[in-house]
Amino acid sequence: MKSILILLFCIPFFYAIGQSGLALSEAAEISVITCGPGQQELYSAFGHSAMRVHDPKNGIDLAFNYGVFNFNQPNFYLNFARGYLYYRLGVQHYDEFEYPYIYFNRYVHEQVLNLTASQKQKIFDYLQWNALPENVTYRYDYFYNNCATKMPDVILKTLGDDVKFDGSHIKTEYSIRDLTDIYLDKQPWGDLGIDICLGLPMDKKATPFEYMFLPDYVEAGFDNAIVKHGETFVNLVKEKRIIYETRDEQDPKGLPHPLLVFSIFAALAIVLTVIDFKKKRLSNWFDIMLFAVTGSIGLLLLVLWLFTDHNAAARNFNILWALPTHLIAVFAFIKNPPWLKNYFGVTLTICILLILSWPVLPQRLHYALIPIVITLALRSFTQYKLRTKIPG
């Protein structure tokens, strides 16, 4: 049963509107739906947004969901790797959209918008146009063009200057990275992965409007927005309905925190280093593993930065510890060239400088990586001091 529900959650039933130009009745409502975060998957930790059109007189109750993607689109995996992420607008019966969120204990809030009949019609006409096959896809961006940002985007495209979003309710000065960290507090490994793969653009201070890449802030943004009725402005949200509120439940148990895992790893490296100096012998097997893994990470970061359209992965300071050149050093272990000793001397210097400058770097590196950088420095020091001859 649970696997079926997950399928429903990921692949909604699409509803063919087939009634382009349909006039909404005076009973029609247009709402913004905010669904709370969930811990089932990494992507679900941020919540979700959709738009609802409910017109009981015309028998319409639809969710317009911009968070859908199609695995079967041509070259999906290649495009995904290159940063060409194409999402689509899915249209489904509202109860089918809502059900999985309630099943997985994720709150559902509805904000009924305070709109005139003509404003409702403009939005509905736009949504119908957007759902046409030739218009249904859009170029997805994690932070600037996603299911949440589409909510104010639709309103502003249809109503223009008749709507004003007031950001004065935002009292914090968070960066994009700060905001993602808040929502990944219960998924530390996911948080670590994002912090490693995404670079300096993540540390940009977000404007109040840019906070709305997150559904919770979309909800707050609409609560503080106004819309023009005639010659006056009124609150954009007419009514707020709590469709479902999250029940208290125990968080699922996950892996040990990365800081603990990496600290144990660093402790083992210290023990191994002491043994190496006592025996005057290098544990090359350990260093080959360490530098091969970090070098591979560095190569991935370099590719994401230079050869893809993942804009948030650019200018990534994690490459200072995950040097792609570590892979060259790993292969050099076979022939043991004279320059290898100096390579580890340079790596040691870089690691020391990185640790000392950690608090003042323009990009905030994840604190759980400090034991890894210490391990790299320690093993580079060991290789530099003992590398006079490599035992067979």
Image (cartoon, rainbow, N blue to C red):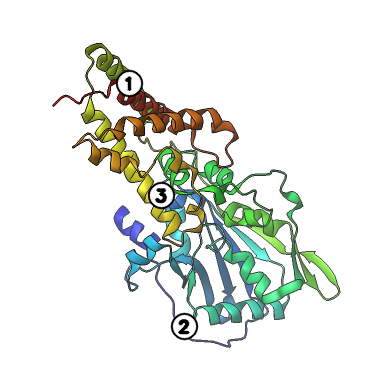
Q: Measure the alpha-carbon separation of dots 1 and 3.
A: 30 Å
- Residues packed near mark 3 inside 10 Å, few (<14), some (14 to 19) or many (20 plus): many
Up-down relation of residue 136 to residue 389 (above or below): below
Eye-nearest disc, 1 or 2: 1
Q: Which residue is mark 1?
A: 385
Under tag 1, what secondary structure?
helix
| Residue 89 x, y percent position in the rendering | 48, 72
Mark 1: amino acid = Lys
Left or right? Give the position of 156 relative to 180. Answer: right
Q: Measure the alpha-carbon separation of dots 1 and 2.
A: 64 Å
**Residue located at (73% from left, 76% from top):** 116
| Residue 178 x, y percent position in the rendering | 58, 43
Q: Earlier in the sequence, mark 2 or mark 3?
A: 2
Q: Earlier in the sequence, mark 1 or mark 3?
A: 3
Under tag 2, what secondary structure?
loop
| Residue 326 x, y percent position in the rendering | 33, 40
Q: Measure the alpha-carbon separation of dots 2 and 3.
A: 35 Å
Mark 3: amino acid = Leu
Residue 324 sits in which quadrant?
A: top left
Q: Residue lying furthest left in this view? A: 392
Left or right? Give the position of 180 relative to 305. Answer: right
Asked whether the viewer can see residue 391, the reply is: yes
Instruction: Name the quadrant of the N terminus.
Output: bottom left
Up-down relation of residue 91 to residue 214 (above or below): below
Asked whether the viewer can see residue 245, the reply is: no
Q: Which residue is mark 3?
A: 301
**Residue located at (45% from left, 29% from top):** 349
Q: Which residue is mark 2?
A: 134
Q: Residue lying furthest front in this view? A: 338
Camera-side residue: 335 or 359? 335
| Residue 220 x, y percent position in the rendering | 67, 53
Under tag 3, what secondary structure?
helix
